[in-house]
């Protein structure tokens, strides 16, 4: 009887969700308002919901309950209590075939539902970047990605020893990269940010482009992470380049506050951190907020001006971003050509991470691709006056759409006088990881 109650709750949640916020936040609010659900209940209900989201826009004519069952069959990788929701013959098929690969499960569903089209799982598939294996990438959304950690320099032996002592089910992928099951309590084994950083495998691999220029950068190198978010790329740059002078900016005050806390835990020391919205042709700081107090000379550390501006938001500015913004306080910018390296981990569609947020498969709108592409071009252009001559720009997206990736890189070359040194689609779909794009440029001509 409890299974039907869980299924009913999942159906109601899916029917009431409109895509206006991350589904994880929507779930959290629901469970907060309905405290009768215990931890096992919450786990089962969430699992049923995400099974439905994983089939994207496939089988649109089925009712929600049937779509949940189809998604659960297609995404099941091991025996769990959730299999009790499946028709007996489907459950028997999975167990008899020892939970076969995605193509075998898809073939079985196609026999049950001849109208099932795997290509319809992922929206805008015709917009994918050129090197992506479309079939493998789309099928990767049927499974939950793994948890990845990066062991920080000097802590490799201790962390690996503790993982072994605790008999943790880990896989050492590279000297510093470790795979763990999603949801593994890594904070009980290692000090997060000081000893290890929770960071997707593909995100870690963007550091390969930093290694290409390590010997060309001065010591200390001046770096601006202009869309810093939680600071993962800044910590990566610190660890790979050893001695750096980091400036971080973002539109969100809370993000930078968390970033400074992470830097403190990491033992890096405070960066030059400023709240900025450069896409709106302004530079904002919060003089009463601790985030802006990390530099003794506020005006000397802000890489922007009223004429040269960049968006450091994770999405184009909207009502929520404007509501966070205080009164404008324009700051005197530094001299042009201040930075040896600018990292633009750009606002993007996030389409390379949708296996972690599969509700996006159902709610993403095609028009967003063009909107992000336009923002990314403006963002990169505005950083260029602050890069030293023959300095570097590392452009990163977690998108799989070519307009945000290869086409953007070509536009930066032809329109902004940048020299492309390396361009990579970091394909994580075969590794149960995200898929990212990264391009490394050198400045040769500064645009007017």
Image (cartoon, helix red, strand yellow):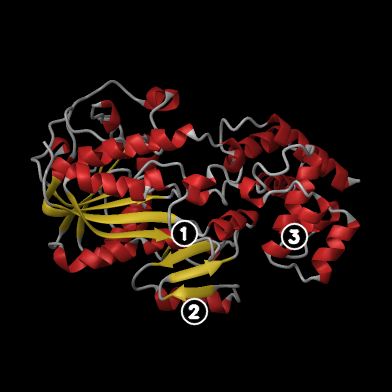
| Sequence-wise first label, 1 or 2 | 2
Q: Is residue 116 left or right of residue 1?
A: left
Front of the two marks 1 and 2: 1
Q: Nearer the viewer, mark 2 or mark 3?
A: 3
Of the two numbered discs 2 and 3 on the same chain, state the one appearing first in sequence.
3
Q: Nearer the viewer, residue 22 or 445?
A: 445
Q: CA distance from mark 1 to mark 3?
A: 31 Å
Question: Residue 382: x, y in percent?
Answer: 21, 37
Q: Return the mark for residue 200.
A: 1
Q: Please report whichever mark, 1 or 3, sits nearer to the chain's N-terminal start.
A: 3
Task: Tell me whether circle 2 and circle 3 mark residues in contact (CB < 8 Å).
Answer: no
Check whether the beta carbons of the residues at disc 1 and disc 3 lie within 8 A of each other: no
Q: Quadrant of residue 419?
A: bottom left
Q: Residue at x 32, y 43 (%)?
A: 227
- Residue 161 badge: 2
Quarter of the picture holding the C terminus: top left
The residue labelled by disc 3 is: 107
Above/below status of 437 relative to 330: below
Crowd tier of the residue under label 3, counting other residues whose Cα lies within 10 Å: few below 14, some 14–19, many 20 or above: some
Residue at horizontal 43%, vertical 52%? 129
Identify the residue at image location x=60%, y=73%. Answer: 169
Q: Secondary structure at mark 1?
A: loop
SS at circle 3: helix
Q: CA distance from mark 2 to mark 3?
A: 43 Å
Location of residue 81 in the rendering, given as x and y in whole percent from the top left corner: 80, 58
């Amino acid at each position: 009887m409890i299974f039907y109650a869980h299924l009913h709750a999942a159906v109601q949640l899916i029917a009431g969700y409109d895509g206006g916020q991350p589904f994880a936040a929507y779930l959290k609010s629901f469970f907060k308002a309905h405290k009768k659900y215990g931890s096992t209940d919450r786990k089962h209900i969430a699992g049923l919901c995400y099974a439905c989201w994983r089939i994207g826009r496939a089988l649109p004519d089925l009712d929600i309950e049937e779509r949940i069952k189809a998604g659960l069959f297609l995404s099941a990788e091991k025996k769990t209590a959730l299999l009790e929701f499946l028709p007996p013959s489907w459950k028997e098929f999975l167990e008899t075939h020892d939970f076969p690969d995605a193509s075998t499960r898809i073939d079985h569903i196609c026999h049950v539902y001849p109208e099932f089209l795997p290509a319809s799982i992922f929206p805008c598939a015709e917009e994918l970047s050129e090197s992506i294996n479309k079939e493998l990438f789309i099928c990767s959304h049927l499974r939950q990605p793994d948890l990845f950690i990066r062991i920080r320099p000097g802590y490799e032996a201790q962390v690996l020893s503790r993982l072994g002592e605790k008999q943790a089910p880990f896989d050492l992928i590279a000297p510093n990269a470790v795979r763990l099951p999603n949801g593994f309590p890594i904070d009980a084994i290692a000090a997060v940010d000081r000893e290890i950083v929770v960071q997707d495998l593909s995100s870690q691999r963007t550091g390969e482009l930093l290694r290409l220029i390590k010997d060309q950068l001065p010591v200390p190198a001046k770096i601006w992470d202009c869309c810093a978010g939680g600071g993962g790329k800044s910590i990566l740059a610190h660890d790979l380049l050893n001695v750096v002078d980091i400036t971080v900016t973002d539109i969100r005050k809370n993000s930078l506050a968390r970033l400074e806390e992470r830097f403190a835990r990491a033992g890096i020391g405070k960066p030059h951190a400023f709240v900025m919205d450069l896409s709106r042709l302004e530079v904002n700081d919060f003089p009463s907020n601790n985030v802006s107090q990390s530099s003794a000379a506020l005006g000397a550390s802000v890489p922007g001006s009223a004429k040269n501006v960049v968006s450091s938001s994770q999405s184009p500015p909207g009502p929520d971003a404007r509501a966070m913004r205080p009164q404008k306080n324009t700051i005197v910018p530094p001299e042009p050509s201040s930075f040896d390296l600018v990292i633009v981990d750009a606002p993007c569609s996030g389409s390379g991470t949708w296996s972690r947020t599969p509700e996006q498969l159902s709610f993403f709108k095609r028009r967003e691709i063009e909107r992000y592409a336009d923002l990314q071009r403006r963002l990169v252009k505005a950083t260029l006056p602050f890069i030293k001559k023959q300095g570097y720009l590392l452009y990163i997206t977690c998108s799989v759409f070519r307009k945000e990736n290869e086409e953007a890189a070509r536009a930066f070359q032809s329109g902004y006088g940048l020299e492309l040194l390396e361009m990579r689609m970091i394909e994580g779909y075969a590794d149960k990881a995200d898929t990212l794009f990264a391009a490394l440029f050198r400045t040769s001509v500064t645009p007017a």
